[in-house]
Image (cartoon, rainbow, N blue to C red):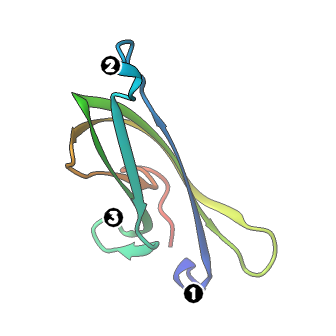
Amino acid sequence: MSLLDIPVLTFRELHVGRFRNIDCGRPPFACKASADSPHYSRGAKSVIHKTRVECAGSEPTIEVHCNGQLMYSTGGAPSTAATSSETRSVKTDGTKTTFHTPEAGGKKVN
């Protein structure tokens, strides 16, 4: 049985960098994250999960850290199949940046 045959749970945790200068008490940025359903990627040769982050703000880029877990369950307690922990520079012009679980070169999940 492959992971594609098992109900899969995913979890993402985002940490967004902060700036020292905050204008008029407003936060200098806002970010939104969306998650794709886990799927098998022929390119990665693995089950993967993608989180896409888009930000808007007064600075051109911000640092975003994303922790991910690709989890599965066969009816009992969930188990972790793969993890990721990435920090990336994200543009604040609304461009989407993609974080992957597992990370490139990480553990393959069949």
Quadrant for residue 63, please give it.
top left
Q: Secondary structure at mark 1?
A: helix
On the image, the x and y values in percent for residue 22 come to 36, 18
Q: Amino acid at mark 3?
A: Ala
Numbered disc 3: secondary structure: loop
Q: Residue 5: which disc?
A: 1
User: What is the x, y in percent for residue 91?
Assistant: 22, 38
* Secondary structure of the residue carrying numbered label 2: helix
x, y percent for residue 104: 36, 50
- Compare marks 1 and 3 and give the one earlier in the sequence: 1
Where residue 61 appears, x then y in whole percent?
24, 30
Q: Earlier in the sequence, mark 1 or mark 2?
A: 1
Query: Is tag 3's residue or tag 2's residue first in the polypeptide sequence?
Result: 2
For badge 2, the amino acid type reads Asp
Q: Residue at x 36, y 40 (%)?
A: 30
Q: Quadrant of residue 9?
A: bottom right
Residue located at (46% from left, 55% from top): 102
Of residues 33 and 103, the one drawn nearer to the viewer in this rendering: 33
Closest to the camera, between mark 1 and mark 2, is: 2
Amino acid identity at mark 1:
Asp
How far apart in space, not on screen, are marks 1 and 2 (Cα)? 50 Å
Q: Residues within 10 Å of mark 3 (few under 14, many from 20)?
A: some
In screen coordinates, is 79 left or right of 19?
right
Q: Nearer the viewer, residue 93 or 105?
A: 93
Which residue is located at x 34 percent, y 34 percent? 29
Q: Circle 2 is placed at which residue position?
A: 23
Asked if disc 3 and disc 2 are in contact, CB closer than 8 Å, the reply is no
- Cβ–Cβ below 8 Å for labels 1 and 2? no
Mark 1 is surrounded, within 10 Å at the Cα level, by few (under 14), some (14 to 19) or many (20 or more) other residues, namely: few
Q: CA distance from mark 3 to mark 2?
A: 43 Å
Does residue 98 sit above or below 91 in this rendering?
A: below
Q: On the image, numbered disc 3 is attached to which residue?
A: 44
